[in-house]
């Protein structure tokens, strides 16, 4: 083999070795950079963990208060319905009593000889 061919082969081999070594170094650097970046993201996420947990707790507390208010409202609505029913029954009783009382007044007017039939109280 000639010296030129040997030098070319050596140059090509050295170039390939340098290329492989360069690629390997760049790959290591990129991976290390990615590891550092990932750790930074994890650190920031860990810092926000407490804040997010507080927000979740406040949301759950608000939901619990909402459920309690709804239940209280349902109780109040049931009480209101019951009171309305009682009021209706008492109005009916009062109306019946008023009708009976008016009849008694009319009967008294009928029985009383001094009563004027057309007079109203």
Image (cartoon, rainbow, N blue to C red):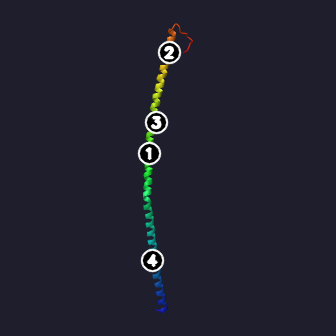
Q: CA distance from mark 1 to mark 2?
A: 56 Å
Q: CA distance from mark 1 to mark 4?
A: 59 Å
Residue at image mark 2 = 103
- Location of the C terminus by quadrant is top right
Tell me the residue at 46%/84% (across/down). 14
Toward the viewer: 10 or 31?
Answer: 31
Give x and y (percent) for residue 62.
45, 48
Marking on residue 77: 3
Q: CA distance from mark 4 to mark 3?
A: 75 Å
Helix, strand or loop at mark 2 = helix
Helix, strand or loop at mark 3 = helix
Q: CA distance from mark 2 to mark 4?
A: 114 Å
Give x and y (percent) for residue 107.
50, 12
How packed mark 4 is, by other alpha carbons closer than 10 Å (few <14, some 14-19, many 20 or more), is few
How packed mark 3 is, by other alpha carbons closer than 10 Å (few <14, some 14-19, many 20 or more), is few
Toward the viewer: 66 or 31?
Answer: 66
Tell me the residue at 45%/41% (across/down). 70
Q: Nearer the viewer, mark 4 or mark 3?
A: 3
Helix, strand or loop at mark 4 = helix
Marking on residue 65: 1
Toward the viewer: 36 or 22?
Answer: 36
Tell me the residue at 44%/47% (across/down). 63
Among numbered discs 4 and 3, the one appearing first in the sequence: 4
């Amino acid at each position: 083999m000639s010296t030129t061919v040997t030098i070319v082969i050596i140059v090509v081999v050295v170039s390939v070795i340098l290329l492989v070594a360069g690629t390997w170094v760049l790959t290591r650097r990129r991976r290390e950079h990615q590891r550092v970046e990932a750790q930074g993201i994890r650190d920031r996420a860990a810092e926000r963990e407490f804040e997010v947990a507080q927000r979740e707790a406040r949301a759950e507390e608000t939901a619990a208060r909402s459920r309690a208010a709804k239940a209280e409202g349902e109780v109040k609505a049931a009480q209101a319905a019951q009171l309305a029913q009682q009021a209706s029954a008492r109005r009916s009783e009062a109306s019946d009593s008023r009708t009976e009382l008016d009849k008694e007044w009319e009967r008294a007017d009928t029985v009383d000889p001094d009563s004027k039939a057309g007079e109203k109280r």
